[in-house]
Every structure is written in C-alpha cells, then in structure tokens.
Image: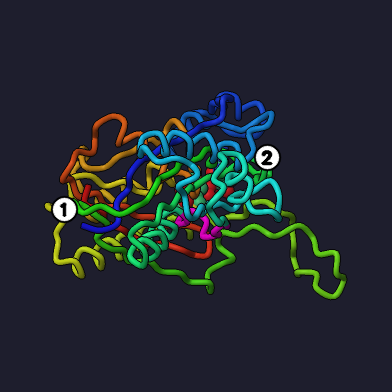
Amino acid sequence: MGTVILGTGSCLPRNVVTNSDLEKIVDTTDEWITSRTGIQSRHIASGDEYTYKLSARAAEKALEMAGVGAEELDLIVVATISSHMLMPSSACFVQNEIGATNAFAWDLNAACSGFLYGIDLADKYVRADKKSKILVIGAETLSTRINWEDRNTCIIFGDGAGAAVVGYSESESGYIGSNLSSDGSLWKLLHMHAPESTNPNLKVPDNTGAHIVMEGREVFKHAVKAMEDAVRGLLEREQLTLDDINLVIPHQANIRILNKLKERLQLPEDKVFINVSDYGNTSAASIPIALDEAKRSNRISSGDTVLFCSFGGGFTWGASLIKW
Ligand code: ACO
C-alpha cells in the first residue's frame, strides 16, 4: 500500500522529421545518425503545439485512465526546460487548459530527470495526505531551444509530453523508493543559457544564446556511469536484485548509452523498454512517454516491479522503483 500511478497519458506533435529531412538542414547522413544514436525520426512541434498544449493533451488521457476528474487534482507539476514563456509556468497554463480549478501548479527544472524528481515529490505529498491527487508531467519542445545549425545537437532531440496521475492505494502495489542525485560542478558539459540579461551589470559571460550546448562524449561517459551507480545503489538499499525487476524504463537518451547501460547491468533485451528510434531524446518527456506506451501495450502487469533511471543537464540523475 502506498503511492501509486493511477493513470498515464502521452502526446506527440503531429509533424514527424526523419533523418533524411535533417540531411537537408545540416551536414549529416541518415547512416551517421542511426549508427551513433539509434534515432530514425522525431516529432517536432508546430502551430500551437506549445509545451503546455502537449502537456494538457497527455494529462487528459492520464486522467481518463485514472478515472479522476481534473477538478479533483490538488497539485500539477510540469517537469520541463522548454516552456514557451518564463512566466507563468507551463503548469499554470495546463491548470487552466484542463480546468483543474482546485490545483496549485508549478514547473520543475531538472532536465531529463525532471519526471523522476516529480514522481518522488508527489510521493512525499501523498504520504503526507492520502487523499492527494497529483498530476506529474514531463514535457518538452526542445526544438525551440536547439541551434539548428549545430549538427552535434539538432539530430538528437525531439518534442513530446507524458503524464501520470499519482494517488494513494491500499493495495499491495506502490512506490518503493528512489535514489536521486545532482552535481552542479559539471554544468558546462550540458547547458542552455537564459536569454541575454537586460541588466548590464548581470550579463553572464559567454552567453551564446538560449540553446543547448553539449560535450557529447563527456555526457555519454557520465550518463552511463551515473545511471549504473544509481540503479545499483537503489537495488542494494531496497535489498532487491535485477532478477526482481520485470521491466526497466530508462531515459531514452540514445541507443548507444542504453546499450552500454544494458551491458554494464547485464540486462536482458526483453527487460528494457526502448522507443528512442521513433522519438529521439525528448528530455523530461522521455520516461513518461515510454511509461505510457509500456502501459498501453500491456508490457506492465499488476504485481510487476518497474525500474526507472535517468540522467540529464545539471547534472541530474537517479533511479526509482514502483511495484504495479
Ligand atoms: N553528422 C555527421 N557527423 C557528425 C555529426 C552529425 N550529426 N555530429 C558530429 N559529427 C562528426 C564530428 O564533427 C566529428 O567529426 P571529426 O572527427 O571530423 O571532428 C565526428 O562526427 C565524431 O564526433 P564525436 O562527437 O566524437 O562523435 P561521437 O561518436 O561521440 O558521437 C554523440 C556523438 C552521438 C553526440 C555521442 O557523443 C553521444 O551519444 N553523446 C551523448 C549525448 C546525449 O545523449 N545527450 C543527450 C542529452 S543528455 C542525456 O539525455 C543523457
């Protein structure tokens, strides 16, 4: 008994951009992108598909699955680094869009780890008040934060949103725990500046604009090690082994990171949920989108123990366990 995910939902933008499409924009090839990242296509937002719009559509599906009305929600947390406005938060826009009139709402910035941080936080609220119903969303339109002339980054990221309704259950299932970490000393390896300061005294040196800058090889090494350590630490603390895990849903960073992680943890192919080829790296949205797909395709059954792990800018990383 404890904190459970009552429903999941996801939403992808209509427009699909393939590797061949990217060949027309930057000096790259389908072969390079596929072999280095495993990504074949990604969804890119257009029209009014802002982060909050994708979030709201994902949220409506999650609420429907949960059988929870929007007005029953107490809190909405949107994990994102790509809101269309700095203020109000995407969460406030979602609150209005879905009619969650009784919820307070705010955004959480933990890059690709945002959804796991959000679920952990929701667990604390639910433990404090079992009646709480919390909507946790991971959503990005990173296409708005990419330098489309930088072939090192523009091929990796995609847009989308995933949502989970969190509440309390007396059943045997529930949130087991998490192992979350951050290390701000390594920020330079993966970062995004804010828009240039209008206060001349507070200009940030080397501000190259509000788009993603990445040292790919360094990020790769840190990501694999951090996720491996987070998983091992969590399993040890909870006195579980990988044999106790039915499904692993990792952050969909890229296929080589995921393959390395599988190799280090000796995870069998069929225990790891991977969809990065279709969506690219959707940052905070990647785990909730994968979770929703896994749930709706019956990859998760009642009684299953599901392991999540993530790594992203900050650096932020972690692992979480939920018994379904
Ligand atoms: N197309 C063609 N060539 C390219 C491209 C491209 N899109 N991008 C880079 N190259 C070239 C480079 O310029 C370089 O050329 P050079 O040898 O002439 O200098 C060559 O390919 C090799 O470049 P590397 O950066 O060394 O390539 P690497 O094998 O490291 O692959 C990659 C790059 C895919 C980014 C890899 O480092 C990686 O996967 N890093 C992890 C990054 C990541 O997943 N970030 C997501 C955010 S964090 C997270 O979600 C975990």
From the image, which quarter does the N terminus lie in? bottom left
Circle 2 residue:
148
Q: Is mark 2 within 8 Å of ligand 1?
A: no
Give coordinates of residue 285: x percent, y percent: 48, 44
Drawn side of residue 67 relative to residue 321, left or right: right
Drawn side of residue 101 relative to residue 298, left or right: right
Q: Quadrant of residue 238?
A: bottom left
Hey, which residue is sitting farthest left in the picture?
A: 243
Circle 1 residue:
172
Give the secondary structure at mark 2: loop
- Image: magenta residue range: 106-114
Of residue 22 and residue 143, the one placed in the foreground of this image is 143
Residue 263 appearing in the image: yes
Which residue appears at 44% of the width and 43% of the height? 163
Which residue appears at 80% of the width and 73% of the height? 202
Give the secondary structure at mark 1: loop
Q: Quadrant of residue 43?
A: top right
